[in-house]
Image (tube, rainbow, N blue to C red):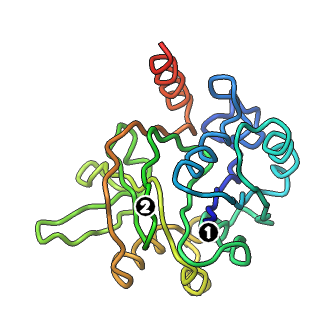
Amino acid sequence: MKGVVLAGGMGKRLREISGGRNKQTVEVNGRPMIEFPLKTLGAMGCTDVTIVTSPEGYAPLKLLVDYGGQHELNVDWAIQPEPRGMGDALYQARYRVGGVFPVLCGDVYFDPAPITVIEKPLLVCHSFEGGRNHIVVDTHEDGSHEVVLRPTKANSDRAIVGYVFDEEVFDFIPTIKPSPDKNEIEFADIYSWYINERGATVADFEGMFADMGTPAGIARVEEHIRNRQA
């Protein structure tokens, strides 16, 4: 099975640490950040991975993954020419993956792997401090789900943190209108389409999750690893 890692971010929230370089090159507990989602995909059953990154991020990431990586995955690469959102980043992998495939962002940490059986589209959710900085899912009393792009205190903190898509997503992405404020292809539209039109499952992850795109997230991961090794 093949997975996808979206690793194009320049780390605005990590600028003091990253110096403006691709954030997935930042060290977390002595290892490049990119290794953690790669290991997670391996634990989910992937043998092959496409990493989508920016033109600027390609060379440093490839060096770390190809020559310093502690993984047993076959890795290939896709380039997102311009920063036009996560939906556009995923679209760059359209000729690399098929069938049903998992997708992770390059700055997420899971312990253990959130999915072990991958058969159909799935959205993995996790409630955590800072979850409202992400796209969240509200589940109503009737069991229906609503995707909220910019949640307020009234909304859930149940953030969508991992995804299983299928190749039909590549037919849907070109129909998405770019966001008016950023001119980006938002993942929120993809989530809503999967929930409302494709009947995707929404499942909660109860293990350890962290967003390593912030200094606090990195510190949490490093503390978790130290405690696990103690």
Instruction: Pinpoint residue 228: horizontal percent, then vertical percent.
Output: 46, 21
In the displayed structure, would residue 149 be above or below residue 171?
Answer: above
How dense is the environment of label 1, judged by Cα within 10 Å: few (below 14), some, or many (20 and up)? some
How dense is the environment of label 2, judged by Cα within 10 Å: few (below 14), some, or many (20 and up)? few
Of residue 117 and residue 146, the one placed in the foreground of this image is 117
Which residue corresponds to the image point at 71% horizontal and 46% vertical from the top-left? 72
Which residue corresponds to the image point at 26% horizontal and 55% vertical from the top-left? 155
Residue to which mark 2 is pinned:
117
Apparent side of residue 147 relative to residue 77 in the rendered image (left or right): left
Apparent side of residue 202 relative to residue 88 in the rendered image (left or right): left
Q: Upstream in the sequence, badge 2 or badge 1?
A: 2
**Which three-letter amino acid code belongs to the residue tagged 2?**
Val
Of residue 90 and residue 19, the one placed in the foreground of this image is 90
- Asked which quadrant contains residue 180, the reply is bottom right
Of residue 15 and residue 4, the one placed in the foreground of this image is 4
Which residue corresponds to the image point at 60% horizontal and 65% vertical from the top-left? 1
**Picture mark count:** 2
Q: Secondary structure at mark 2?
A: loop
In the displayed structure, would residue 180 be above or below residue 228?
Answer: below
Q: Secondary structure at mark 1?
A: loop
Apparent side of residue 39 relative to residue 64 in the rendered image (left or right): left
- Asked which quadrant contains residue 175, the reply is bottom right
Asked if the residues shown at circle 2 and circle 1 are in contact, with their CB atoms under 8 angstroms apart, the answer is no
